[in-house]
Every structure is written in C-alpha cells, then in structure tokens.
Image (tube, helix red, strand yellow):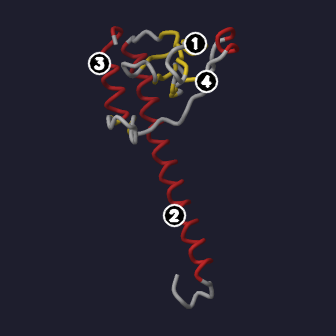
Amino acid sequence: MGEDDGLDWPDRQRRAVLAHAEADARRRAAEHAEAAGIVAWFVAEANRRGLRPTRLVARSYDGRGRYRTRLTGWYVDRARSRAVDVQGGFHLLTVPGGLRARLLGAEPEPSPPPLIVGEGGRDGESIPLRVLLTRRLDAGNDG
C-alpha cells in the first residue's frame, strides 16, 4: 500500500487493522485445529490404555461451590479445573453456580483447547497441551 493507491491515511489504517485481525483469526483457527487433534489423540490413547473416565464436577468461580455435571471424562490437571470429556470436548470446569446449578447440575460448555495451557495467566505457569495430556496418560487410573 503505497502513497499512490488512492486511499487517504485513515482508509489505509483501517485496511491494515483488518488485515492484521484476519491474519490473527487464521492463526488462532489453525492453533485450535491443532489442539483439537491433540485432544482427539488423548481420548483415543486414554481408551486404548484403559483409563477409566469419571463423572466430572464443576466448581463455582469463587471456588466454594461444587456442582455435578452430566459430563464423563478425565481431569487433566491437579486442580481439577480442566478436563477432557469422552467425546473429545475440552472443558474449563468453572461455572457461575447458583441455585439452579445446585438443584439441576451445571452444564459447562466445551471450549477451544489452547496449545499452551495457562498461557497469560497471573501465576506465570504454562504448559504445552501435549505435555499436560501425556502426563495425565502416564499417571494412569491413579492420576
């Protein structure tokens, strides 16, 4: 985009911003697709190794309430805040909570899995998704 493209500065800025946003969206989509492949590999490997899935429980945002879910799968971190369900969905197991969740259970929606779990978190601890899931597989049914 040179000076002779017929666009004034604000139009060139707008085009540049849109181009960057589109490139970022393509990058994120590629990362999510790669991470989804890793999660699918984990589910297949967990089944192959005979890891028993368990009924997953969600916690309230403040950490005080525990809510049953209809999900069955494997917790993948020690805090039991992340899990993979038997269909290959990646879940963050924190929910708003409240009376409805207490009576009927919580329904955490699957979210796109990240390639780096914990990236950007305040504690500074992050781990590649494949490493996290491999550790969970290596822990076996005791994990």
Determine the residue positioned at 52% across, 20% down.
Answer: 85
Instruction: Give the residue type at disc 3.
Output: Asp
Q: CA distance from mark 4 to mark 2?
A: 34 Å
Examine the image and state in which quarter residue 75 appears: top left
Instruction: Give the residue type at disc 2.
Output: His
Q: Decide which of tag 3 and tag 2 comes sooner along the chain.
A: 2
Secondary structure beneath dot 2 equals helix
Q: Decide which of tag 1 and tag 2 comes sooner along the chain.
A: 2
Question: Which mark is in front, 3 or 2?
Answer: 2
Q: Are marks 4 and 3 in contact (CB under 8 Å)?
A: no
The label on residue 67 is 1
Q: Decide which of tag 1 and tag 3 comes sooner along the chain.
A: 1
User: Which of these two is toward me, 59 or 1?
Assistant: 59
Question: Which mark is in front, 4 or 3?
Answer: 4
Q: Decide which of tag 4 and tag 1 comes sooner along the chain.
A: 1
Determine the residue positioned at 35% across, 33% down.
Answer: 130
Q: Decide which of tag 4 and tag 2 comes sooner along the chain.
A: 2
Report which residue position mark 2 lands on: 20
Q: CA distance from mark 4 to mark 3?
A: 32 Å
The label on residue 96 is 4
Instruction: Give the residue type at disc 1.
Output: Tyr
Answer left or right for 78 relative to 7.
left
Secondary structure beneath dot 4 equals loop
Q: CA distance from mark 1 to mark 2?
A: 41 Å
Secondary structure beneath dot 1 equals strand
User: Which of these two is toward me, 141 or 79?
Assistant: 79
Determine the residue positioned at 33% across, 12% down.
Answer: 140
Secondary structure beneath dot 3 equals helix
Answer left or right for 53 relative to 9.
left
